[in-house]
Image (cartoon, rainbow, N blue to C red):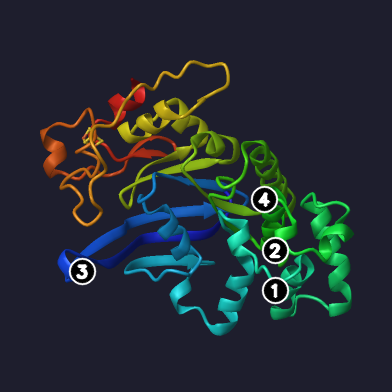
Amino acid sequence: MANETISVEGATVNFTVRQGLFNRGKREVHAVDNVSLVLHENETVALVGESGSGKTTLGLSILGLRELSGGHVLWRSESIATLSPQQRRAFRRDVQVVFQDPYASLNPKQTISEALRRPLKLHKAMPRSEMDAYIEQLLDKVGLRPAGLYMHRFPHELSGGQRQRVAIARALVLKPRVLVADEPVSALDVSIRTQILNLLKEMKAELNLSMLFLSHDLGVVRFIADRVAVMYLGKIVEIGPVETLFSEPGHPYSRVLLSSAPSVKPGEANRFSMEVMGEPPKPTSPPSGCRFRTRCPLAFDKCTTVEPPLVNLKPGHFAACHLAAEVASA
Ligand code: SF4
């Protein structure tokens, strides 16, 4: 097994929301609840879940942009909360992010060249005289050719796909070890998505990157991920190698997601027919026992009182359901 790059141990993120008349009431939301996860070198792990599942909050915590209420994010075996200034600088250089909306993540007043020069200058990554040639090379690598044509353009002069290529180039400019990609293709036209996914795959292989890929789209996840972690109401309910999880899902929620995916495998009939019941519960008052029980078609008495632990189904494949073995073999 490859070395770990980032790991998360018992990560918990709580925050308070105001409710009720004149917003006087306060309720606590457990956005991420006791989550543990390891990202290995040269591996892509996809975090999958609906809006409100906690995947974005977890991604932000891994980037050090959202404080944990409990647990740790470890980088090279050190908690990122206690890194020295020098280690923090290295962490900022080595762990980069691509957001969903490239337009919002690029400064509209900076040319593409300026946007890519800025991190190089901040981290004193190379002599200034070498920056233009390096940036041209990088733009060429992310498919913006001829690079000279794009260097002095502003974001509004580019298409959505071109802007996302710039955002990827900016994330790669410091030669990071880890890339966190938060729904990087969901704001793009369908015709552009495959190009950007292929680009991310190529860059990962060429630069030996590890990638944490956040998405609600299982088709995309199957294309890009080595392992998949399914999140529901702040918890990982299933995790495993991509092919195992797509062929033998052990959690009813994973089956529901798979049954609503447009194409599980091209040319193959979708055999995961399972539907959720009702609406998602409020994150301020998650159900007792299994969090999925109010929507689970298989729920029974024990699910109300006993929270199911993640059980090992196959090497590297775990699901948090009292019926996991039966569900996986169904
Ligand atoms: Fe459904 Fe019970 Fe399994 Fe939860 S533990 S997913 S409610 S069967």
Question: Image quarter for residue 271?
Answer: top left
Left or right, 166 with respect to 146, comes to: left
Q: Amino acid at mark 3?
A: Asn
Left or right, 278 with respect to 304, comes to: right
Q: Is residue 259 above or below residue 242?
A: above
Q: CB under 8 Å between callouts 1 and 2? A: yes
If you read the primary sequence from the N terminus, does the residue marked by circle 1 or circle 2 appear first?
Answer: 1
Q: Amino acid at mark 1?
A: Pro
Dot 4: what SS? helix
Mark 2 = which residue?
170
If you read the primary sequence from the N terminus, does the residue marked by circle 4 or circle 1 appear first?
Answer: 1
Mark 1 vs mark 3, CA separation in Å: 41 Å
Mark in front: 1 vs 3: 3
Mark in front: 2 vs 3: 3
Image quadrant of ligand 1? top left
Mark 4 = which residue?
160
Mark 2 vs mark 3, CA separation in Å: 40 Å
Dot 2: what SS? helix
If you read the primary sequence from the N terminus, does the residue marked by circle 1 or circle 3 appear first?
Answer: 3
**Residue 23, label in figure:** 3
- Residue 30, how many percent across, how many down? 27, 59
Mark 1 vs mark 2, CA separation in Å: 8 Å
- Residue 202, how many percent across, how many down? 72, 45
Q: Amino acid at mark 4?
A: Gly
Dot 1: what SS? helix
**Picture residue at 83% right of the left edge, 64% below the top:** 151
Q: Amino acid at mark 2?
A: Arg
Mark 3 vs mark 4, CA separation in Å: 38 Å
Mark 1 = which residue?
119
Left or right, 144 with respect to 52, comes to: right
Whether disc 3's CB lies below 8 Å from ligand 1 is answered: no
Dot 3: what SS? helix
